[in-house]
Image (spheres, helix red, strand yellow):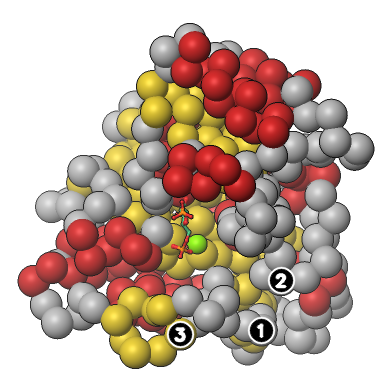
Amino acid sequence: HENNLAQPVGTTLDRYIMRNQSEFAYATGELSQLLRDIALAGKIVNREVNRAGLTTIIGAAGAQNVQGEQQQKLDVEANIRFIRALTNGKEACAVLSEENEDIIHTGNTEGRYVVAIDPLDGSSNIDVNISIGTLFSIYRRVSPIGTEATPADFLQGGRKQVAAGYILYGSSTMLVYTTGHGVAGFTYESSLGEFFLSHPNIRIPATGPVFSCNEGYWFEYPEYVQKFLMSCKRRTMSGRYVGSLVADYHRNLFTGGIYLYPPNKKAPQGKLRLLYEGYPLAFIIEQAGGLASCGKRAILDLEPTDYHQRSPLFIGSPELVAELIAGNMEPV
Ligand code: AHM
Ligand code: MG
């Protein structure tokens, strides 16, 4: 994919989106507005994340989310902020969030889009002041305009995404997204309250020095994954694992490398969620010249069956992902 969205570094996100409106699949301006709504919520969450250590907001809210995991207060906050921005923005008729079992109808039955989000991923990192992120995936609805969204709107499959991206709350806050015309990255300038184009036309190196996985599960990994990792070590590649998907992914996007969340005995489908983690990151990686696989098939070709389904994830530089899959002799 060539990036048709060539724009000078320093362009504001709003201007970039405006100038490139005609490149979107449907040049109605609604998707542009939706991306701006997400960026606005990202700024608000960024503010909350930055002062998390200073306020009582930090710490467990006492509730568990639908996956049975302890929910942090900041997760709840981020979830509320994103849903509110998407509701007020009017372009999304429904939202699927990691934090809610069922889809949330925004009341905007005229909205043409649905959005799947992980409002704040890497929650175990919040309390220890390590980078966290937001992931989002956007579809044009298939249900009739003027009615409520249906499960089919969210279960279209990764290839039907019209846009996807993430926000990394790191040493700088960045927004990276694609609409299927290449990948662009924007860095947040907090004193101005603006995202500026800092990384136009992001391409992942064909190979790279980093492998990222939780090696604590080594003995649970399938043999082909162990063999691949052994070969990474023989080449003295670097092991790098934040344990925050967006951060690990973002690093490898620039340095080249591979992120692995293999199946393990307890979690035969791994841990990561397809609709709001696998799909958006796979869309971005393919647009950046990389690959994303579950070990057998491209992530974007996996059939969605339920909102919170999980899938193993191997994602990054094309040569490394291809090498890993080539070692998988398990039946497809
Ligand atoms: P979360 O939804 O509870 O935040 O979990 C998702 C996170 C990812 O950010 C990260 O890549 C992964 O869990 C790490 O899992 P593990 O601790 O099993 O290595
Ligand atoms: Mg998550």
For label 3, the crowd category at 10 Å Cα-Cα, with few meaning under 14, some 14 to 19 and many 20 or more, is few
Q: Secondary structure at mark 3?
A: strand
The residue type indicated by label 2 comes to Tyr
Q: Residue 17: x percent and y percent?
A: 49, 45
For the residues labelled 2 and 1, say whether their Cβ atoms are less than 8 Å apart: yes
| Residue pictured at 39% horizontal, 49% vertical | 243
Above or below: residue 122 compared with residue 8: below
- The yes-or-no answer for disc 1 within 8 Å of ligand 2 is no
In the current view of this chain or complex, which residue is farthest to the left? 54
Res. 64 mark: 3
Given this view, does label 2 or label 3 mark the residue nearer the observer?
A: 3
Q: Residue at x 80, y 79 (%)?
A: 150
Q: Nearer the viewer, mark 3 or mark 1?
A: 3
Residue 225 percent coordinates (x, y)? 64, 32
- Disc 2 to disc 1, C-alpha distance: 8 Å
Pick the front one: 140 or 269: 269
Closer-to-camera residue (90/172): 172
Residue 322: x and y, percent?
A: 71, 21
CA distance separating discs 2 and 3: 18 Å
The residue tagged 1 is 102
The answer for how far apart the CA atoms under marks 3 and 1 are is 15 Å
Q: Residue 244, can we see it?
A: yes
